Amino acid sequence: MRAKDPKVSLACGLLTAKLAGEDGKPEGKSGTVESIVAETNVVIEITETNGVTRAHGDKAAYSAANETLVLSGADPMVELGAQHVQMWSPYITIDLKNGMVNAKGPVRTKIPAGVMSKMSPGASNLKPGGTQSGLAEEHADILSDDFQFISGSGLAVWRGNVRVRDPKLAVTCELLTGTQTPESGALQSMVAETNVVIQITETNGMTTARGDKAVYSAQDETLVLSGKDPMLESASTHLQMWSPYITMGLKKKTLNAKPPVRTRIPPGAFGQPGEGGFNLKPGGPPPEEPRK
């Protein structure tokens, strides 16, 4: 079964439509479509001025009353061409009137890297003189229990058991909020909340950041950790840090922490006094050899 008009094309194995009846309907409403149910190998393409939205699933139900399209069945998928977003979920609702998409878990979304590439190596290389070793992959996968997207504002919200999967970056939290750039669809800002863990894999080790909240700002390319006991650990510099407010400057590779600050560094980082003790006198003779 195939149906097509200038803006919508539909293919499926079974199509059922309910039309408005004669009785009790305002003039001009009789014969209009109240609902449509498409089943078996459903493919829907909606052409918009800025791109094409594609939907696949076992079943698609359209309601004219609230202007929604609900996809369900085995592995429904929606691709928002204009926003460069793909999502897979057993239950996806598209609010056609308000430009909103809701997906119920388990949800998998794929988005342009954007923020993720800014946080990847060598953005996190805090070692003086470190060089950038490359960017993250073009796209990032995000798993969650729930996903909501508002196309007009570019606001994306992931809730429940959120996991960002990327070859060089991993983020886990309970709530992740991001906003898209209109041009590329990449996230230009990101706020992760509740049990936040960020792991950045580098060629010389891994950087791990933990906290109640992590905020990335594209304007100055900073990542700020805050909340209860934020902690940063860099394997490449062998540095551990605890502070209520830690700011990572990803562009200039800087690190700032507000008091009270606790740091842990490797033994011997300040040098070793040796058996003769420190020689504190400038130009003084070296300590005597211990007697045998």
Image (spheres, rainbow, N blue to C red):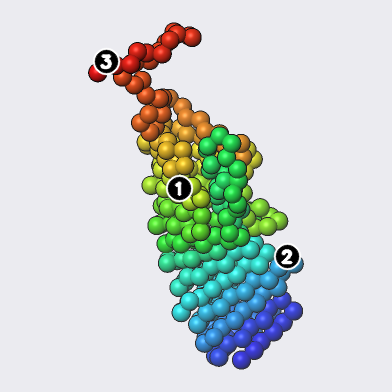
Residue depicted at 59% across the width and 81% down the height: 43
Q: Is residue 253 visible?
A: yes
Do the residues bearing badges 1 and 2 touch, measured as CB atoms within 8 Å? no
Q: Position of residue 116 (x, y in %)?
A: 56, 52
Judging by the rendered image, the residue that carries numbered circle 1 is 206
Residue 182, image x and y in percent? 68, 55
| Tag 1: amino acid | Met
Q: Does the residue at mark 1 contact the one at mark 3 (Cβ under 8 Å)?
A: no
Q: Residue at x 72, y 82 (%)?
A: 5
Image side of residue 75 versus residue 277, left or right:
right
Residue type at numbered disc 2: Asn
Write down the residue under mark 3. Answer: 291
The C terminus lies in which quarter of the figure?
top left
Q: Which residue is mark 2?
A: 50
Question: Helix or strand or loop: what does disc 2 sit on?
Answer: loop
Q: Quadrant of the N terminus?
A: bottom right
Q: Earlier in the sequence, mark 3 or mark 2?
A: 2
Which label's residue is closer to the chain start, 1 or 2?
Answer: 2
Circle 1 crowding by C-alpha within 10 Å: few under 14, some 14–19, many from 20: some
Q: Residues within 10 Å of mark 3 (few under 14, many from 20)?
A: few
Say which quarter of the image contains residue 232. Answer: top left
